[in-house]
Amino acid sequence: MDEFQMSRLEFAKAVNDTGAELGENVACCARLVAAWEDGDVGCPQMTYRRILTQMTGRTMQDLGFRLTTRATPVQPAGLYGTDQEEDVNRRAFLGDSAGALFLTLLRPGPKAAAPGRIGVRDVRAVHQAVTTLYAHDHNHGSAALRRDAGQALHTAYQWLQNGRYTEKTGRHLRAATGHLSIAAGWLAYDSGRAADARSLYGEALAAARLADDPGLEAHAFGCLALLAKASGRPREAISAAQGAQNAVRDYGSPRMLALFAMREAGGWALMGDASATDRAIVRAHTLYAKGPSDADPSWLEFFTPAELAGLESLARADLGQHERAAAGAEQAVLLHGDQFARNRALYQADIAIQHAVRDRPEPEAAAEAASRVLAYLPEVRSDRLLQSLHNVESALQRHNGVPAVADWLEEYRTTTGTG
């Protein structure tokens, strides 16, 4: 931006144009440029090195990339440990049976440079990458896989742009890539990168329209609703949630409609409209009670009765109904059992906050719930969880004269290194 006076999108186009001049067929995008700038890519592929050198007249070292893979001295990196430790965890994940399938897209070999013929197996690999990402994210958070998801998505886009496939396969590949874009967007959102998430959800929405896939369109709208609410834009959240419901009105999945009705309730709650919130919540519970359907997509597996209770509790909290919010969050944690560790941790944090800010505060109960949240660290790697813990700290500060609260505040600062 400073030197070339270009946006990331414009720079990506310049990379592709320069590549064409050099006889290289590349598919650079704004997301890849962002990964270069953010340091998520140690060093670009050889093709991109030649292009960047041609464009800038500089070596990779001059541009800030790292050409060596030798181990570097371990430096403290806060709560989640060092980059070296994260790489160890990532390798452990990628070495298990689920992670091995993810490598199909992460390191696809010669097909990345010259995709050739794309078939059903390749489309299945993209879907498997999505499943693998969600499976790991539910229990460990997003930190270790966000970069890998971006790399897998880039490979999928290369297949779309450079591969050879039938019209039917192309439609399926585009839809699968849209679902992968949503998964990558979710990881970006959970990592505190709202702008990246919004861009990825927008790409998924475009893919849905091109592939004529109403389920994908609704999923993208639903994610945009969640992001809008988290960003403090309730009207946008309501509109997106209603758009999601309209897209799958005749899809045959009552539970998908229930989820989007609950997302709509969240928007109404943030606006302070209790009546509209209650109507949307009642509609969500009514739809959910119709039970599962063959039309339910696999990504909907997280929307259990526990999550239904948890989403209602968040809406109650935004309406200032703290006792009902605390009770709902406690129900969500109980119903989750041993599954979805990150969501359990987030609802535990919400329990602590609601006990601390209710009309008749219960600081000891808040401190007890807050202690259970710390037990999830560092196994769950989520910037949203860290933000929730920060919110817990703020809520408990007013009760720091209570011994249990004072002890928790000290434990929190020690554990997160914020003292």
Image (tube, helix red, strand yellow):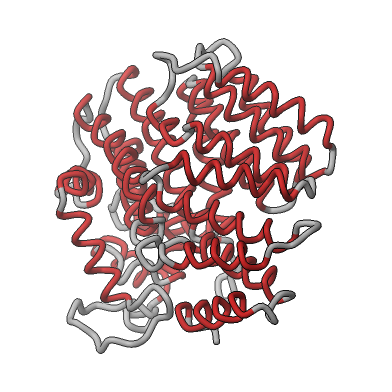
Q: Which of the 4 quarters of the picture holds residue 65?
A: bottom left
Near-viewer residue (236 or 286) = 286
Residue 24 percent location from the top left of the image: 28, 53
Q: Which of the 4 quarters of the picture holds residue 120?
A: top left
Q: Is residue 66 above or below residue 210?
A: below
In the picture, the quarter occupied by the C terminus is: bottom right
Residue 320 percent location from the top left of the image: 79, 49
Residue 386 percent location from the top left of the image: 52, 67
Residue at the (31%, 62%) spot, across then down: 48
Residue 387 percent location from the top left of the image: 58, 65
In the picture, the quarter occupied by the N terminus is: bottom right
* Relative horizontal placement of residue 117, taking residue 52 as reference (left or right): left
Residue at the (42%, 63%) spot, across then down: 35
Residue at the (19%, 43%) spot, across then down: 101
Count the labels in the image: 0
Near-viewer residue (326 or 187) = 326
* Relative horizontal placement of residue 307, taking residue 338 as reference (left or right): right
